[in-house]
Amino acid sequence: MTSIDRRALAAALAGLAAPALAQDAWPNRPIRLIIPFAPGGPIDTVGRLVSDRLRERLGQPFVIDNRAGAGGSIGLRATVQAPPDGATFVLTSSSLAILPAIYANLGFDPRTDLTPVSLVAEIATTIAVRADHRFATLQALVDEAREKPGTITYGTSGIGSSNHLSGAMLAATARIDMVHVPYRGAAQAMNAVYTRDIDVVFASTVETLAHAREGRARILAVTTAQRIAALPDVPTAQETVPGYVAPNWFAIAAPKGLPAPILARMSTELAALRSDPDFRARFAMLGAEPLMSSPDTLATRLAEDVPTWRRVAAEAGIRAE
């Protein structure tokens, strides 16, 4: 073998080894965490808490990149288009399972065009009113909606949001007619409750819990299957409307093709947070339950929830452009 051949062979072997070495060294640069919603919202709050802990564990900064718009699809599309090199992840909500139901031309399938990493948290959606509202219970709301169809207004963080679909599902299950009023974020929807522009708001505990604790809002129900630890005296909506459960969760995903060693490392570091007492306490203050699941668990959840939300969106006639 000539010296030229040896050099060519050495270069080829080095090229083959480079990706493996890069994976072994991961992370060796700052990591971008895309959040497909506006700063200051529930998922942004959770994202900053998670990213701070991952920075401590992985030794690299996590740079929050808020890419709001189109129900979260703008940020998700940016993730789909990013290289699968461990430098980009996305923290999103259960809108990940809702988007295929409301967009005819989404341009990607979250079940096949992303790498599932972890379910991060189960977040209860709450049905809330201002503290002095005439509705003292969810039953009172349902009764009035049946007596006066189309007169009760409910606000959410936007068309096609998980909160919007939760409201539509309640209306369908209870067989009532309510008017949806979309806002550009949960905070604006909460403000609309106080200015009496809407009757009720569907928003996560991250957004409503502090208001309730301060006596400014009344939470009529949570949309989870069971009552939550942060609000033990607040009933589930299905105690009033049998069969109504509207799950809401946050999850981390990555571009399709994320190398297995990077996926395993990220999954391991997230799982370690689940048993961190301080981390769990911070989540509890938000009314959230940390999950930090396996990638397969997130994939299964997506497969189960996409058909559910497709049915809800179709029955309610919810479509987005």
Image (cartoon, grey):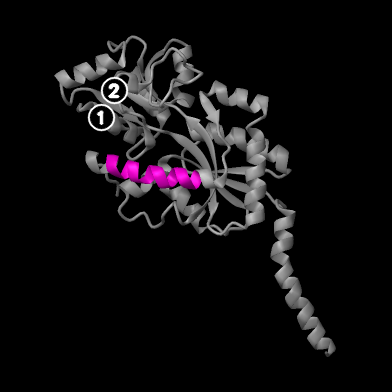
Task: Left or right? Give the position of 267 relative to 173.
Answer: right
Q: Is residue 96 or residue 213 the one in the foreground?
A: 96
Q: Residue at left 19%, top 23%?
A: 151
Element at badge 2?
loop
Indicate whether residue 259 is drawn in magenta.
no
Q: State which region is magenta.
A: 298-312
Task: Left or right? Give the position of 209 relative to 142.
Answer: right
Quadrant including the N terminus = bottom right
- Please give the count of numbered marks on the rendered protein: 2
User: Residue 152: x and y, percent?
Assistant: 23, 22
Element at badge 1?
helix
Q: Is residue 88 or residue 69 the one in the foreground?
A: 88
Q: Residue at left 26%, top 31%?
A: 180
Q: Are marks 1 and 2 in contact (CB under 8 Å)?
A: yes
Q: Residue furthest bottom?
A: 2
Q: Residue at left 57%, top 26%?
A: 283
Residue 128 position (above or below residue 94): above
Instruction: Determine which of the numbered discs, if any, sits on residue 241 in the image.
Output: 2
User: Residue 318: x and y, percent?
Assistant: 26, 42
Q: Main secondary structure of the magenta part?
A: helix
Residue type at tag 2: Val
Residue 34 position (above or below residue 257): above
